[in-house]
Structures are given as structure tokens and as C-alpha cells.
Image (spheres, rainbow, N blue to C red):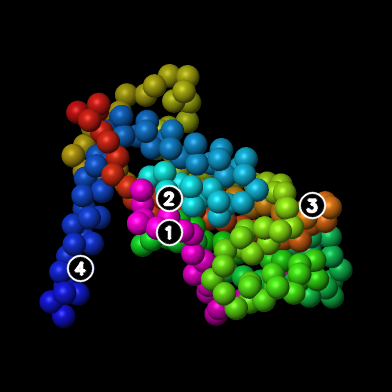
Amino acid sequence: MMLAALLCHGAVQAQESVAASWPDTPVTRLKAQALLQTLNATLLSNPSATVTLQNWCADHRMAGEPRIRALRDQRTRKPADAAVREQLKIAADEPVGYRRVQLACGDHVFSEADNWYVQSRLTPEMNRLLDTSDTPFGLAVKALNFSRRTLSSTLLWAPLPAGWEMQMPTLTSSDQPLAIPERVLQHSAILSRGDGVPFSLVVETYRRDLFAFPLDNALGR
């Protein structure tokens, strides 16, 4: 009990230390804007969100072992509707697999993903991995040499107001940590095999845990 309490206390102190390194100042907001836009651009230019998130975790030293894990939600079910089937170019009676996962690195949950996939367009081993393991989707289907076509990209958080790049607004500073919403970014995309056949539609929602690392604000002091 005492060990658990000490570990919990240590985790809380670590979270408070990280939050303290993100004070609500103009410099912090500018850095947050740059980080968010960099993350968005990298996700959009890479066919695998898993690879991007794993690199992000490693680059910012967010875990001792920067490996992305898929935490499966086996209770949620979302049948493929007509819009999903149209995007995947399949008939109304074609079986469609569904997987909802959280992608985590260390103690940080980076994203939530809803994924509909055409089972007949994957190998039996890929379907087995998706049904029975915590293997991230991008790693499970890596052998397909797939490409990604973005359907939508929405910033759910703006550290700086619109138009800041044309004229920097006057921002006040605060000793309080910068308030980051739970969800910061959302993408939807179609994944296609190397032969151009679509096999998956994914909706990914990215979370504030992506910014749970100490930010050097020495220049902003």
C-alpha cells in the first residue's frame, strides 16, 4: 500500500512538473502552435499514424520504451453505414470488421481511432492479429504497402487566434498552466493497398497527452 501510494504521488508530481513547464505565455502558445502544426503536417504526409506517433514519443522522450500499443475497446460496436461502404467501394452485404482502439505510448494515450476494414481484402494472419492482439492497425497491415488518402483534417484546438501569422496579437501572460483541451486534432482517411484497392476507413482523434512532456520555456522568462 505504501509503495503504491508513493508511486501515485510520484506520478502526480511528474504531471505537475510537466504542467508547470507549459505556463500560459505568448512564447508557450507560439511553441504549442508550432508543435501542433508540425504534428498535423507529419500525420498528413505519412501513411501510418502509428509510425508517426511512435517517432513523436521517441523524439520527446515520453516513455522508456517508445512503442505504440493499441488498447482495444471490445465493447463498442459501430456497424458500417452506407457512407462507409461507399468510401470502401463495397456492396451492402460485404462483411466489414470494426476496431476501436486507443493508441498509447508509455503512460500516455495519444489518440482514439475508429476503424472499419474489409476483411476479405486482408490476409488471414492480418485479420487474426486485428481480432486477437493489441497490434496497432498500421503494423498489422504493413505488408500491404498501403497508401493513405485524407478525407478531412480538423484542428480542434488553436493556441493562437486566427490570423496570427499575419499580425501577432497582443497576448497576456499567466502563471497558470496553458489550458489544453482533451482533444486537439481529428483526421479521417481511406487506406488503400498497393494495387489501389481501398480496405479501411479510419477516424482518428488526437489527445492532449501528446503534449505531456516538459517544454523548455527558458527563452520566454
- Label 2 crowding class (10 Å Cα cut-off): few <14, some 14-19, many 20+? many
Disc 1 marks which amino acid?
Cys
What's the residue at 49%, 52% (across, down)? 54
Q: Where is residue 91 in the image (x, y as percent from the top left)?
A: 86, 68
Tell me how far mark 4 sits from mark 2, CA to CA.
Answer: 22 Å
> Is 104 drawn above or below residue 76 in the view shown?
above
Q: Mark 3 highlights which residue?
A: 194
What's the residue at 36%, 52% (across, down)? 62
Disc 4 marks which amino acid?
Leu
Element carrying mark 1: strand
Disc 3 marks which amino acid?
Gly
Residues at discs 1 and 4 in contact (Cβ within 8 Å): no
Which badge, 2 or 1, comes first in the chain's sequence?
2
Q: Mark 2 highlights which residue?
A: 57
Which badge, 3 or 1, comes first in the chain's sequence?
1
Element carrying mark 3: loop
Q: Mark 4 highlights which residue?
A: 7
- Indicate whether residue 140 is drawn in magenta: no
Q: What stretch is highlighted in magenta?
A: 61-81
Residues at discs 3 and 2 in contact (Cβ within 8 Å): no
- Indicate whether residue 66 is drawn in magenta: yes
Tell me how far mark 1 sits from mark 4, CA to CA.
Answer: 19 Å
Q: Mark 1 highlights which residue?
A: 105
Q: Residue furthest right?
A: 91
Q: Can residue 91 be seen in this view?
A: yes
